[in-house]
């Protein structure tokens, strides 16, 4: 019997561009692109953006785009200007080697191999910046906490760069990559104002040293007044040198206390006083984290949208991007640290009035089964029934028993469930118990989000759907049977984690880091931007040929 001859191994293709035009290893630029390393840069490894950089040089047939025979000084100056302006978007120019690039641009008569090295260095730095600006410096799918947000669709960076370099309008490309969400733009405006103010002097710290009540007199009241003005919570026309804790100040302080989940009594104790001692630099650092998270959010289109800010324990429902009066309500989110509500972006597809609760296996085994074992009537008393579920994935049509709770007053989903299919299997829902909404900290659930005003949220979601008004919704929420309502227009839902958040009145709010995600994000950012050792001088010429090994990232 003849033995079949094995087929020869096929070459591995890493990108679409390699099918059309493989990167030439004997080309100085091609050699750098293949290595995905650039020793002249602080972060030598540019593999995260290597595909984008390769596409740019594919369109130039792997020839320099900056250091050409008709070198455009305006493009080079615009490149430096773009990177120098990185702080406007809470990004650090040093992360894009801006000082190193200045040296490369001012170099005298480098040879062709060095030109290739310098050219790619400029391109990598610009691509890194634009990629970070649009997608974020940290890939949210790589952090340790749960994130279920798909990447934004890629823009034609190669085409846009070629177009703007040809017309010498390079600075205009930034606006095409900057996030368009209102939250990002609001944060950016506040960041600019804080950067202009600079850091507040330590001598101006608001430390009264004792509890202050309305009507009290204290010399540090002047500093409190300054802080409240900086937060846009106090009219600039008010007295500036008064040392009296007057009604205007009390009203503003109560608002801050309410935002922070404190008792809004206007009494200034140690906890409230600490809220006004955050320096500008500390606020800028917090805003930088918020802007990084805002880069993960897809660009929104005008229309209805629901936003849950997890650490704020609040939900906002907007009819449009500029809705001045969004629906706002308290929510209960997943308990820290074991049942964190995930960050996600999905579309609400349907509602279920008087829903069944399909009890997750882990909850059934850990919480319900032990009670049922000690009380044979427990399941019946809780309206829990066991139903046979067909397992379509199992050969032979296997099945298993699943526990579910019938609709009613004991059902933890309450009278309505708002569903946006997602891999985390979480949703918004009503609850039969409303006492928890009176707590300042409300991380109490298994991961789903309980809403305090379900009837109003149902009215918002079904607002433009024929046959549904306030009365019909009220009837559906008290009917004896489950009713499934498909939305004619899907509503985007964002579960967001914003310890620093701008509300619809353009007020900057700070919330406790209930899940510890700020610290995790800081660590992820520090890991990316840890200084790497690059070749000490830009004049070190990289000899590139077929056999060259480019130094790996240390």
Image: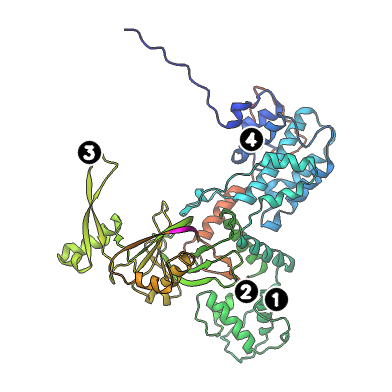
Tag 2: Cα neighbours inside 10 Å, few (<14), some, or many (≥20)? some
Mark 1 to mark 4 CA distance (whole Å)? 48 Å
Check residue 185 in the rendering and tell me which mark sits there, or answer none.
Answer: none
What residue would you read off at disc 3?
396
Check residue 37 in the rendering and tell me which mark sits there, or answer none.
Answer: 4
Q: Is 489 a magenta residue?
A: yes
Q: Residue at x 43, y 60 (%)?
A: 341
What residue would you read off at disc 1?
203
Looking at the image, tell me whether mark 3 or mark 2 is earlier in sequence order: 2
Q: Is residue 289 left or right of residue 198?
A: left
Looking at the image, tell me whether mark 1 or mark 4 is earlier in sequence order: 4
Note whether residue 452 is visible.
no
Looking at the image, tell me whether mark 4 or mark 3 is earlier in sequence order: 4
Res 324 quadrant in image: bottom right
Q: Does the magenta stretch mainly form a helix, a strand or a loop?
A: strand
Looking at the image, tell me whether mark 1 or mark 2 is earlier in sequence order: 1
Q: Position of residue 538 (x, y in %)?
A: 76, 38
């Amino acid at each position: 019997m003849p033995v079949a001859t094995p087929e020869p191994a096929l070459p591995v293709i890493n990108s679409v561009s390699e099918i059309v035009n493989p990167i030439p290893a004997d080309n100085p630029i091609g050699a750098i692109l293949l290595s995905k390393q650039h020793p002249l840069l602080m972060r030598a490894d540019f593999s995260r953006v290597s595909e984008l950089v390769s596409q740019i040089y594919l369109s130039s047939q792997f020839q320099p785009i900056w250091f050409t025979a008709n070198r455009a000084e305006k493009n080079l100056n615009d490149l430096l200007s773009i990177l120098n302006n990185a702080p406007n978007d809470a990004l650090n120019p040093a992360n894009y080697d801006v000082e190193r690039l200045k040296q490369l641009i001012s170099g005298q008569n480098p040879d062709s191999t060095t030109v290739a090295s310098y050219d790619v260095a400029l391109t990598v730095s610009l691509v890194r910046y634009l990629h970070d600006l649009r997608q974020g410096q940290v890939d949210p799918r790589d952090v340790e906490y749960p994130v279920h947000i798909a990447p934004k669709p890629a823009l034609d960076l190669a085409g846009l760069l070629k177009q703007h370099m040809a017309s010498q309008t390079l600075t205009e490309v930034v606006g095409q990559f900057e996030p368009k969400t209102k939250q990002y733009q609001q944060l950016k405006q506040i960041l600019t104002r804080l950067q202009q103010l600079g850091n507040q002097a330590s001598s101006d710290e608001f430390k009264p040293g004792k509890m202050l009540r309305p009507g009290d007199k204290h010399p540090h009241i002047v500093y409190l007044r300054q802080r409240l003005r900086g937060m846009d919570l106090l009219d600039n026309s008010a007295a500036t040198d008064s040392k009296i804790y007057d009604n205007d100040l009390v009203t503003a302080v109560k608002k801050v206390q309410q935002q922070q989940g404190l008792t809004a009594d206007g009494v200034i104790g140690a906890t409230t006083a600490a809220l006004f001692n955050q320096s500008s630099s500390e606020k800028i650092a917090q805003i930088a984290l918020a802007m990084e998270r805002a880069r993960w959010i897809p660009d929104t289109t005008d229309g209805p949208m629901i936003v849950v800010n997890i650490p704020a324990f609040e939900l906002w429902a907007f009819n449009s991007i500029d809705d001045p009066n969004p629906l706002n309500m308290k929510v209960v989110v997943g308990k820290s640290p074991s049942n964190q509500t995930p960050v996600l972006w999905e579309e609400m597809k349907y509602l279920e009035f008087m829903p069944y609760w399909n009890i997750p296996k882990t909850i059934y085994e850990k919480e319900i089964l032990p009670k049922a074992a000690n009380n044979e009537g427990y399941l019946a008393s809780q309206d829990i029934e066991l139903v046979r579920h067909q397992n379509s994935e199992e050969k032979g049509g296997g099945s298993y028993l699943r526990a579910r709770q019938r609709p009613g007053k004991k059902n933890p989903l309450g009278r309505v469930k708002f569903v946006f299919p997602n891999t985390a299997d979480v949703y918004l829902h009503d609850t039969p118990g409303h006492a928890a909404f009176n707590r300042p900290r409300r991380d109490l659930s298994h991961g789903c989000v309980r809403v305090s005003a379900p009837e109003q949220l149902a009215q918002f979601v079904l607002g433009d759907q024929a046959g549904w008004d306030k009365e019909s919704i009220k009837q559906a929420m008290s009917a004896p049977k489950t009713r499934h309502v498909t939305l004619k227009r899907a509503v985007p839902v964002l579960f967001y984690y914003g310890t620093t958040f701008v509300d619809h009145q353009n007020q900057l709010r700070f919330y406790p880091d209930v899940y510890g995600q700020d610290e995790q994000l800081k660590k992820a950012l520090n890991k990316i931007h840890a200084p790497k050792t690059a070749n000490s001088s830009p004049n070190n010429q990289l000899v590139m040929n077929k056999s060259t090994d480019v130094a790996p990232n240390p």
